[in-house]
Amino acid sequence: MLELTLLLIAAYLLGSVSFAIVIARAYGLPDPRSHGSGNPGATNMLRTGRKSAAALTLLGDALKGYVAVWLAQWATLQYGLPAYAPYLAALAAFLGHVFPVFFGFKGGKGVATAVGVLLALDLRLGGLVTLTWVAMFALTRISSLSALVAASLAPVYGWWLLRSGIETAILTALSVLILARHHSNIRKLLSGEESAFKRR
C-alpha cells in the first residue's frame, strides 16, 4: 500500500534527525560521538556539563518519536490504513534514530525516542514504561540498567493493556532492538564496570 509505505519512509526520516548532534553543533560542543560513551543521546550530552543541551536532546528525541506516531494516527484515519500502522511508524522512527540516514547510519540507543513513540501510541503504556525507568534509576542511579528493565517490560505492559498480538509483536521488536543497542552496557553491568550517576 503506497500510503503506508510513504508513511513509514516519513517516520524513518523524522527519526533520523539526531538532536544530540544538532544541538551539540548549535552549542559549539564536541560531537557526542567523539567523547564519553560515544552515544549521540541525552545521557552522553549530560557528560558535557551542559544540562540544558542534555534536556533539549531528550525533549527533541522524544518529540520526534511522538510526532511520527501522531502523524501515523492521523494518516490511519484519513486513508483507512491498518490499525497497527502507527505501531509500524513507531518502529520506523526508532530505526531512524538508531540508523540515521543523515549521519552515516550511526545513531543512538533510542531510549528517549522509544518513550516518545510509546506515549503517543498509548498514554498508559508510555506512562508505565517511564515510571519503570524513573523507579529503577532512583534505586540504582544507573541509566542503562533503568532503560533495560523498562524496555523489557514494555511488551508485557503492552499485552496487558492492548491484548493485541500484532501490536505486542511490534513492541517486542522495539524492545529487542533497545536491548541489542545496549550490548556493551550489558557486558559492563555483568562485570560490575557500568558507571552510575552520583547522588547529590
Image: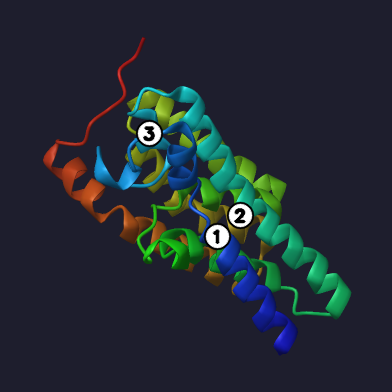
Task: Name the residue at 21% across, 36% down.
Answer: 194
Image quarter (top left, top right, bottom left or bottom right) of the N terminus: bottom right
Q: Which residue, as the protein is rendered here, is positioned at the far left?
A: 191
Residue picked out by circle 3: 29
Task: Name the residue at 58% across, 38% down.
Answer: 59
Q: In 3D space, how far apart are the residues under numbered discs 2 and 3 (Cα atoms)?
A: 24 Å
Tell which circle, 1 or 2, labels the residue nearer the N-terminal end. Answer: 1
Q: In 3D space, how far apart are the residues under numbered discs 3 and 1 (Cα atoms)?
A: 22 Å
- Residue 55 percent coordinates (x, y): 52, 31
Q: Residue 65 carries which label?
A: 2
Nearest the eye: 26 or 48 = 26
Count of marks overlaid on the render: 3
Q: Which mark is residue 15?
A: 1
The amino acid pointed to by label 1 is Gly
Tell which circle, 3 or 1, labels the residue nearer the N-terminal end. Answer: 1
Q: Which residue, as the protein is rendered here, is positioned at the far bottom?
A: 1
Give the class, few, some or many, for how many residues have Cα within 10 Å of label 1's Cα (few <14, many ≥20): many
Query: Residue 31: in sight, yes or no?
Result: yes
Tell which circle, 2 or 3, labels the residue nearer the N-terminal end. Answer: 3
**Residue 7 image-quadrant placement:** bottom right
Disc 1 element: helix
Give the class, few, some or many, for how many residues have Cα within 10 Å of label 2's Cα (few <14, many ≥20): many
102 sits left or right of 4 in the view = left
